[in-house]
Image (spheres, helix red, strand yellow):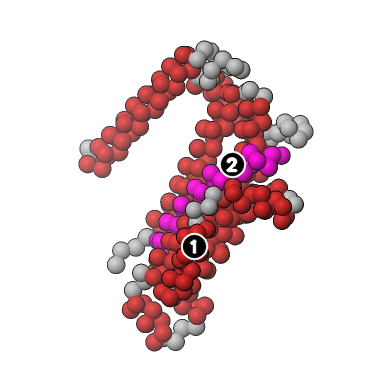
Amino acid sequence: MTAARRERLRTTVYSLVLLALFLGLWQTLAGAGGKGGKGAGIPGPVAVAETAWHMLADPFYDRGPNDKGFGIQLGYSLMRMMGGYLAASVVAIMVGVALGSSPALLKAANPFIQILKPVSPLAWMPLFLYTLKNAGQAAVLVIFVSSLWPTMANTAFGVATIKKDYLNVSRLLQLSWPRRFFLVIIPAAAPAILAGLRISIGSAWVAIVAAEMLIGGTGVGYFVWNEWNNLALNSVMFAILAIGVVGVVLDFGLGRVAKLVAYTE
């Protein structure tokens, strides 16, 4: 057995042991609070698995405003998230390139960035609701704000650290700015940009769930809040696990893309 296979086997065994410990601890806590169910402590793994099987058996039913399948709720959340995330990514990359290309501009903008960056995206929600008068659009803007800063900062860093030789050669070849942007700047800064996009999509997924708890109507966040109001803790636990799985899938997808653009000099 090769060293790589031994390492993969060891990692798999460790993962299974940690999973068993997690499920055992979960079941112990559930048993200490009483059998899973409404008002009887947290539900155990078996109860949540039964709820998951029931919900995933028919995830796209629609029986009215407060009774939609989990697949429909997840679809609303993903659409809102991708709308805000893609718009923020375009703006962040363009602004990041401008900041990274000009040290003076970066120093001038840095105080404003440092003031705005720590503000929680949800703090903007009242202003967005007052301005737009539309809860769905306000949630998309919350995602926009939450996705903006990591990509912008990483893009600016990536552009600022591009080797001057690459830019000098592009000037000698008299490349136009659009060609220099797509053929030199973006490829050279791609690893840093993808790292920022990967952080941003995690921030966006966290923010959309919280935003939907506030706006109500549809989405995974609203589903969690509605099930809590119904004291359906089995459904709440299932939704929490599903949110985590979706977050892992999104991160894994961008991680694979990041590997494709990685390079060594």
Query: Magenta region: which residues?
Result: 189-218
Q: Secondary structure at mark 2?
A: helix
* Quarter of the N terminus within the rendering: top left
**Residue highlighted by disc 1:** 113
State the quadrant of the C terminus: bottom left
Is residue 193 shown in magenta? Answer: yes
Magenta highlight: main SS: helix
The amino acid type of the residue labelled 1 equals: Ile
- Give the mark nearest the N terminus, 2 or 1: 1
Relative to residue 177, is residue 240 depicted above or below?
Answer: above
- The residue sitting at 63% across, 38% down in the picture is 213
Which residue, given by chain and number where applicable, does mark 2 sit on? Answer: 210
Q: Is residue 156 left or right of residue 57?
A: left
Q: Residues within 10 Å of mark 2 (few under 14, many from 20)?
A: some
Q: Which of these two is toward me, 173 or 40?
A: 40
Q: Which residue is painted at 68% across and 42% down in the image?
A: 215
